[in-house]
């Protein structure tokens, strides 16, 4: 469910709506959540957003906002450099899966589920 908020004060007047919450990446020591969301800023079309939020979403840190195309490109860059992101040979990206395309959040979730299914099949074959 979208969450509408606004912030007022001097030059900081703006509004935002969290259109879709994809997940929490981490939690800070002070309890703020680094989240990956689709956020509509000032009534514009939603963009993908990574930033830290207070749990009630009343305060936020500076973050990174990306278009769908930028998120897909980031995913493909990370996938192409999976060895750089691995720890103890535990590669987090399935090297055999196809590239993510810029078709939208619902399609991206479907590709992610396909990737999970592929990873499970690979693990079963390896054991």
Image (spheres, rainbow, N blue to C red):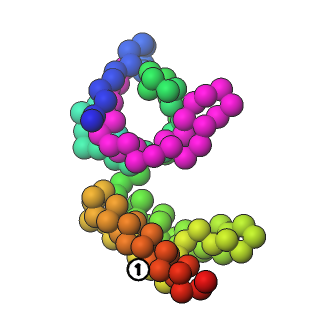
Give the percent coordinates (x, y) of residue 60.
Answer: 50, 28
The quarter of the rendered structure image containing the C terminus is bottom right
Where's residue 45, x and y in %?
25, 43
Residue at 34% over, 21% down:
6
Query: Looking at the image, is 36 positioned above or below residue 127?
Result: above
Asked which secondary structure carries label 1, the reply is loop
Q: Specify the farthest residue to the right.
A: 88
Magenta stretch: includes residue 123: no
Q: Look at the picture and state if 92 lies above or below 59.
A: below
- Looking at the image, which residue is at 42% across and 59% down? 71
Quadrant assignment, res 5: top left
Left or right relative to 118: residue 106: left
Q: Residue furthest bottom?
A: 125
Which residue occupies the extreme top position in the image? 9
Classify residue 50 as left or right of residue 112.
Answer: right
Asked if one can make out residue 19 in the rendered structure from this viewpoint, the answer is yes
Q: Nearer the viewer, residue 4 or 46?
A: 4
| Magenta span | 13-38
- Measured as percent of width and height from the top left, residue 82 is found at 60, 73
Instruction: State the residue in front, 19 or 16.
Output: 19
Q: Is residue 58 above or below residue 93?
A: above
Residue picked out by circle 1: 98
């Amino acid at each position: 469910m979208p969450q509408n908020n606004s912030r007022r004060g001097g030059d900081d007047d703006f509004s935002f709506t969290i259109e879709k919450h994809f997940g929490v990446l981490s939690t800070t020591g002070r309890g703020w959540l680094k989240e990956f969301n689709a956020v509509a800023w000032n009534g514009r079309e939603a963009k993908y957003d990574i930033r830290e939020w207070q749990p009630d979403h009343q305060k936020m840190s500076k973050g990174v906002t990306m278009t769908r195309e930028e998120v897909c490109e980031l995913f493909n860059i990370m996938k192409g450099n999976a060895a750089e992101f691995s720890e103890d040979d535990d590669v987090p990206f399935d090297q055999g899966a196809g590239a993510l395309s810029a078709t939208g959040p619902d399609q991206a979730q479907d590709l992610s589920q396909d990737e999970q299914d592929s990873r499970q099949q690979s693990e079963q074959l390896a054991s």
